[in-house]
Image (cartoon, helix red, strand yellow):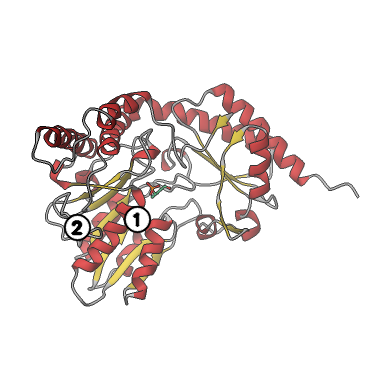
Amino acid sequence: MIYLDHAATTRVRAEVRRAMAPALDSVFGNPSSAHAGGRAARALVDAARDQVAAALGARAREIVFTGGGSEADNLALRGVAQAQGERPGHLVVSAIEHEAVLETARALTDAGWALTVLPVDGAGRVDPAALAPALRKDTALVSVMLASNEVGTVQPVAELARVTREHSRALFHTDATQALGKVPIDVAALGVDLLTLSAHKVYGPKGVGALYVRRGVALRPQVTGGGQERTRRSGTENVPGIVGLGVAATLAAAEQASEQPRQRALCDRLRALVLAGVPSALATGAEGAGRLGNFATFAFPDVPGDLLLVRLDQAGVLASAGSACASGSVAPSHVLLAMGLPPTVAAGGLRCTVGRETTEAEIDRAAAAVVEAVRALRAPVPA
Ligand SMILES: Cc1ncc(COP(=O)(O)O)c(C=O)c1O
């Protein structure tokens, strides 16, 4: 099996599993309990908060643990919107956001919020020049992801955040779920007010993430209750998950500089082999450093992406489509459409994302499988 779907999720790495084990066993206390068992669990949560903060250049108090990236995105958008008071205002997001941002922004329009969706260019990049005219007096939040989960394009977030600051009073949120461990992240250098992370994209456990909330940012909690996380997210802390996130984030940040060039070379090789084997194929997303090093994405005109995935699966290559499958019909990806690809091309999207265990031999076998599958799907059906 050749696993080329690391943007979907990753295997929990051994260091993370080892660090989590005590929190599943001996250190099982509730961090809110005042006794020794509770204090030991609290110490684990505090240490993980320090680790996540250090990976982002943030302060520990600015980290709110959540039940994953989707929840962090929801907390950012709904939390900022609802903290503005009764009168709905205006939001800006990009056309290529993850559904956790896009659907949340759309849901806020039901509550009267106005929404501007920023376009992207053919590489999936938001043009900072398009942002200033979109900002209004009542813009409360701009949300543009740090890197695309579909094509890996890195967004000019520092510049977008600067434009936002200079032209409005809006806060700036970035979803860095795919970017952690792939590009350096420093919240001060980026100039963002809120930033989303998820553990399972960086060899941590599923169902745990974090939202960086810059000191002084007002946020309405979305999960109310016992007041954990300084009242910003109630519920007994997922101590094993939080410990796992802390270690996973530390390792991702520490290994980024050495691991990303290796993964980029693998992805460049995959792109070259597939484009050589299928001359009509398009490599989607940005070139060079404009794209995360672990992404190799394609569009094959007139090839149904869902059938391609089935063939690859049968060949032992696990990848994903640039298409979302809803109620049995395959809809072309909103990201590829926003990048200007015609629907017949966007429907043939393929996303290959490599990881720390991916080898060059696997890339060569996967490339051959892709070329063969595309040729087979294009071959005329015998009468
Ligand atoms: C960019 C981005 N944001 C948010 C999410 C959601 O994260 P989670 O699966 O932890 O809810 C994902 C994962 O699919 C993602 O890629």
Residue 121 visible? yes
Mark 1 nearby-residue class (10 Å; few <14, some 14–19, many ≥20): many
Residue that numbered label 2 is attached to: 225
* Residue 267 or residue 123, whichever sits in front: 267
* Residue 324 or residue 270, whichever sits in front: 324
In percent of the image, x 16 and y 60: which residue is there?
Answer: 218
Task: Residue 111: give x, y in percent of width and height.
Answer: 32, 75
Residue that numbered label 1 is attached to: 144
In percent of the image, x 35 and y 61: which residue is there?
Answer: 129
Separation of disc 1 and disc 2 at Cα?
30 Å
Task: Residue 288: give x, y in percent of width and height.
Answer: 45, 38
**In the rendered view, would you say 31 is above or below 214?**
above
Kind of element beneath mark 1? loop
**Is 8 left or right of 234, judged from the image as shown?**
right
As drawn, the label of residue 65 is none
The disc labelled 2 sits on which kind of residue?
Gly
Mark 2 nearby-residue class (10 Å; few <14, some 14–19, many ≥20): few
In percent of the image, x 22 and y 34: which residue is there?
Answer: 28
